[in-house]
Image: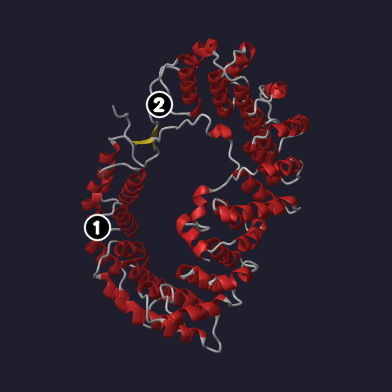
Amino acid sequence: MRFAVYLWLTLGLSLTACAAGEIRPDFAMESDPELKIPEPVIGFQKKSKPLWLAALARPEADLQRLAAETIAQAHLFGVPELIEAAPTLKKIVTTEATHPVARFAAARALIALDATETAPDLFEVSQRHGADLRQLIEPALAKWKFEPIRRVWRQRLSAKDTRHRELLLAIHGLGESGDGSAVPLLLSLTHDSQRTSAVRLAAARLTGRLRDAELEVAAERLTQLTSATIVDRLCAVALLHQHSSETAQSALLRLARDREPSVAAAALTRLNAINHDLVLPLAEQAMQNDDAPVRQQGADAFVARPTPERIAVLAKLLDDPHPDLRGRVRDALFVLAKSPELDAAVRQSATNLLAGDRWRGQEQAALLLAALDHKPAAPRFVELLESTRGEVMIASAWGLRKLALPETLPAIFSKASRQTEIRLKQPSLPELDAQVAHLFEALGLMQHAPADPLLRSYFPKNGSLGELSRSAAIWGLGHLHAGQSDEPLAVQMVGRLTESSAAVPFESPRVRWASAVSLGRMLAKSQVPLMRAYLGPKVMPDSTSLAIRWAIHELTGELLPDAEPSIVSKSGWFLEPLDEDE
């Protein structure tokens, strides 16, 4: 057990944390070469802002509304210095004669501009001009930590006639502001069976966030009721959100066995947060629950405290019906396999699933074993190329490309050839396109010369063949002929690259990109003039232009200027200048 704790602390592992390193069947051509398109910059017409400010100052309600809405949207889009509109917006909000729709739009614009200096005015107006305005303004006041409104919120909690929406608004506002003085009122709402479930749960959750001790008795009171409902039990868990005492742990352990999955999942989540050891006795049973969140909490405990025996149990979730859960378990097992004490257990468990007949387990095991570079899985990958499930077809093809074993090349070539024959006779399915693309990448990277005619057959534009496999074929030919001069092949590639944009059907940018990259890889210097002509006077911020820039550098050593970021501008504002900015 000491080893397991050490491993957990060293790897910092959790199912949630694994998402960043997700194993997926990516394409080698996506990163070979790695070409980064510069981030676009925001562009706008400088003459627009004066028009909007002028419209905002007009007395007509529709102009005020439209101008305020435009200012809010433009600020979010990135137009700078719109805070200049705040004084006029404030005047619209506070003037008694303002039309309600204009007042609402102006208040929303002030909030979008984060005009915190207008908080007192917004507060006063929100209390005089209706519930809809309060729903808009009060969350902003909570975010801005505007203290005077807290008294209003506390009064609402104690009043019997507070409307449902405004009661929830007060609870959320007090939560955002972190007002611990409201805890007694919140507890009263939590225990009030006459209140709605939404109000009770919101009150309990806020109380649990505000207090990290002394709520055990309140939680116990909710669970000991002879008629305790699901809401009662959920509220009990929520109250213990930050509690770690032995009494709290005992209560949570009881709730973790609850027949209602939402209650059990919430209790297990808190127990895992306190100490994963608390969940271990319940973990295996939890992983058999019908509810995915409950299964995930059981898996979290085993991931945090792994042993070879627990790996075998955990790996069964690679066949889980819930796609997110089986993916997270797969990624967790990949990290756990970095430990010498667990590596064999991970590989054996995945191999067992790969040998089975359940497609989910086959897919996830293939992805895991390929990511682990588990060479013994190759024969089974070859068998699974014939699967009728698209997910398994793709995972096994990707796996063979990752393992890169020369002895699998005949099988890879055979499958790619047979799939091509099928696709030429009937419309292609997306999974066939992806599978063949992975197979072509494998053939190119391992320089399988017999594949040359097959890869060349993907040059013509044919809707049945698909852009993924067409681009992979051309990219693969670049690897197959790397450093070699093949003029007929280079002519075909530059033809794909430079074909007129008016051609019907339009050539895929992915195919153009692959053609440029392969020209550079094949040292096709004779095609540089055509590539320069197609590129034009400057490098544009798109994949094809960047690929040509890369290829010309590979062929001549010349480093062309970097691509300038594209300018993203928005049009269609309610008022725009007639003439363009200089």
Element class at badge 2: loop
Foreground of the two, 489 or 189: 489
Residue 476 percent coordinates (x, y):
62, 26
Element class at badge 1: helix
Residue 73 percent coordinates (x, y):
36, 47
- Residue hosting label 1: 116
Horizontal side of 552 relative to 456 (left or right) equals: left
Residue sitting farthest toward the bottom: 226
Q: Would you place residue 523 above or below residue 388 in this image? A: above
Identify the residue at image location x=55%, y=61%.
303
Q: Amino acid at mark 2?
A: Ala
For marks 1 and 2, give the one nearer the viewer.
2
Q: Residue 118: name its quadrant.
A: bottom left
- Residue hosting label 2: 563
Q: Amino acid at mark 1?
A: Thr
- Residue 57 visible? The answer is no
Q: Would you place residue 488 above or below residue 264 in this image? A: above
Q: Would you place residue 347 above or below residue 287 in this image? A: above
- Residue 268 visible? The answer is yes
For the residues labelled 1 and 2, the Cα–Cα distance comes to 40 Å
Residue 299 percent coordinates (x, y):
58, 63
Q: Residues within 10 Å of mark 1 (few under 14, many from 20)?
A: some
Foreground of the two, 487 or 68: 487
Colouring convention used in this rendered image of the protein: secondary structure
Q: Residue 480: name its quadrant.
A: top right
Foreground of the two, 517 or 53: 517
Q: Are marks 1 and 2 in contact (CB under 8 Å)?
A: no
Q: Of marks 1 and 2, which one's residue comes earlier in the chain?
A: 1
Residue 300 percent coordinates (x, y):
54, 63
